[in-house]
Image (cartoon, grey):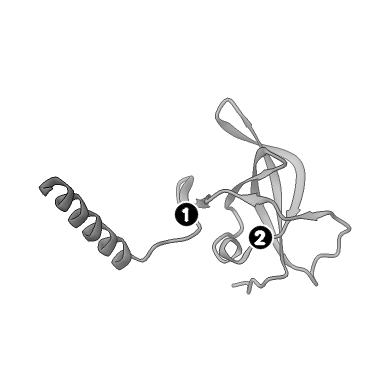
Amino acid sequence: MRLINKNTIFEGLFLELKDKTLHKTKQRIYFKAPETVFKKIGIGDIIPFSIEGKNCHALIIQVYKSTQLEKEVSIFEPKFKPFFLKKATKGFKKTDYITIPEEEIIVTFEKNKKQIVNILLQ
């Protein structure tokens, strides 16, 4: 297992979206991610993000600590979408970066249910 820290750099293959299908290109990109993102993603995941208003996707193929990267590359910090595609046994599974604990979901549901009942009773 690789320890991921704030100086982690991800290498990915740029994916091109054509006719609702992602296609690999030979273009490699290098990027940094905020803490909420880099704690969740790993090799084999597809990361949707945007650069200068354009939506892009990258397939992570390598993870480096900044001391391990021995290449002259431009590294950028894109604006990440709120989800990513996690590599699963068969294909990919859409996963949110921030997961809400189940207890919190139940409490929120009960609170909303009481508010709806109060509104209906008025």
For the residues bearing labels 1 and 2, Cβ distance under 8 angstroms: no
Measured as percent of width and height from the top left, residue 62 is found at: 69, 58
Amino acid type, callout 2: Ala
Q: Is residue 116 rendered to the left or right of residue 39?
A: left
Q: Residue furthest front?
A: 122
- 105 on left or right of 20: left
Number of other residues with Cα within 10 Å of mark 1, as a class: few under 14, some 14 to 19, many 20 or more: some
What residue is disc 1 on? 96
- Dot 2 lies on which element? loop
Residue extending farthest to the top is: 19
Q: Is residue 19 above or below residue 32?
A: above
Figure check: 46 above or below 1: above
Dividing the picture into quarters, in which one does residue 8 lie? bottom right
Which residue is at 68% across, 71% downward? 6
Residue at horizontal 76 percent and vertical 47 percent from the top: 28
For the image shown, how many numbered marks are present on the structure? 2
Pick whichever of labels 1 and 2 is earlier in the sequence.
2
Q: Which residue is mark 2?
A: 33
Mark number displayed over residue 83: none
Residue found at x 59% / y 72%: 1
Relative image position of residue 31 (x, y in whole percent): 73, 56
Helix, strand or loop for disc 1:
strand
Residue 59 in percent (x, y) is at: 64, 48
- At 78% from the left edge and 69% from the top edge, which residue is drawn? 66
x and y, in percent, of residue 57 in the image: 63, 43
How far, Cα to Cα, is label 1 from label 2?
A: 15 Å
